[in-house]
Image (cartoon, rainbow, N blue to C red):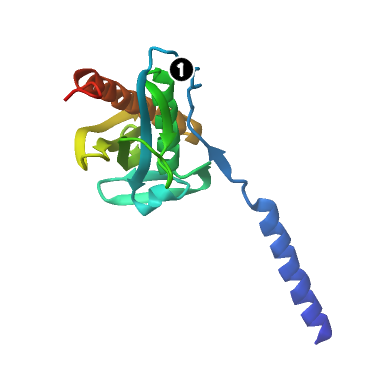
């Protein structure tokens, strides 16, 4: 009986070790961030705040998400974002707005932040879409909120797909990053147009 128990224990241990040997490493990915320049005196004398980017629960976690058909969503087990997509979007937006040189400062909204204007948004899709061709879909919406008046002054919706060049995760990440970069630069350009048409201090 003792011999049988010992054999069962050794078999279980062997299976456990084999399982450990076959486990795959998790790969982490992030998006590219532009380097923020030293602001010049030509920047608007306007501090801009970037608030929370909302999103579905799955975009507040780190799995890389894929969509099959209209309603089915899945997530890769061994491929993840370094941060939740909502945080990646916020960080990249702050860097792009800072890099534009259009503002005195661009910072994340915090409990002690002072400033009249807040950019905030929602991420709807940050997803690999599988079909005849694989694409990276980015859908998001942003608004400019005036804390002084309590009004929304400007909104912008973006939704586009970017072709994925090969059937691997790095290619999916590249497509999503390229798409996100294009969308956030649209946001930055739209904000610049708004403030150009509505200079701060105009009555």
Number of numbered markers: 1
Name the residue nearer the viewer: 51 or 14: 51
Name the residue nearer the viewer: 36 or 137: 36
- Local crowd at mark 1 within 10 Å, few (<14), some, or many (≥20)? some
Identify the residue at horizontal 76%, vertical 74% (top origin).
Answer: 9
Q: Residue furthest bottom?
A: 1
Q: Position of residue 142 (x, y in %)?
A: 27, 36
Identify the residue at horizontal 36%, vertical 41% (top origin).
Answer: 51
> Quadrant location of the N terminus?
bottom right
**Camera sees residue 165:** no
Q: Secondary structure at mark 1?
A: loop
Q: Position of residue 165 (x, y in %)?
A: 42, 25
Residue 141 occupies which quadrant of the picture? Answer: top left
Identify the residue at horizontal 24%, vertical 18% (top origin).
Answer: 196
Q: In the visual, does 37 lie left or right of 163? A: right
Q: In the visual, does 17 lie left or right of 50? A: right
Q: Residue furthest left?
A: 203
Identify whether 112 is placed above or below 170.
below
Residue at image mark 1 = 39
């Amino acid at each position: 009986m003792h011999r049988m128990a010992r054999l069962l224990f050794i078999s279980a241990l062997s299976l456990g070790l084999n399982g450990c040997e076959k486990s795959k490493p998790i790969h982490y990915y992030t998006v590219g961030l532009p380097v923020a320049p030293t602001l010049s005196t030509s920047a608007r004398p306007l501090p801009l705040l970037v608030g929370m980017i909302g999103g579905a629960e799955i975009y507040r976690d780190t799995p890389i998400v894929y969509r099959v058909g209209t309603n089915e969503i899945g997530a890769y087990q061994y491929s993840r974002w370094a941060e939740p997509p909502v945080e990646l979007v916020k960080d990249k937006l702050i860097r792009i707005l800072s890099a534009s040189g259009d503002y005195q400062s661009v910072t994340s909204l915090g409990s002690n932040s002072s400033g009249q204007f807040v950019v905030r948004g929602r991420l709807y899709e940050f997803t690999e879409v599988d079909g005849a061709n694989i694409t990276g879909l980015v859908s998001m919406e942003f608004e400019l909120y005036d804390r002084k008046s309590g009004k929304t002054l400007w909104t912008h919706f973006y939704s586009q797909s970017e072709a994925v060049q090969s059937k691997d995760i790095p290619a999916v990440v590249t497509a999503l990053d390229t798409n996100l970069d294009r969308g956030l630069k649209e946001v930055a350009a739209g904000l610049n147009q708004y403030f150009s048409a509505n200079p701060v201090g105009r009555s």
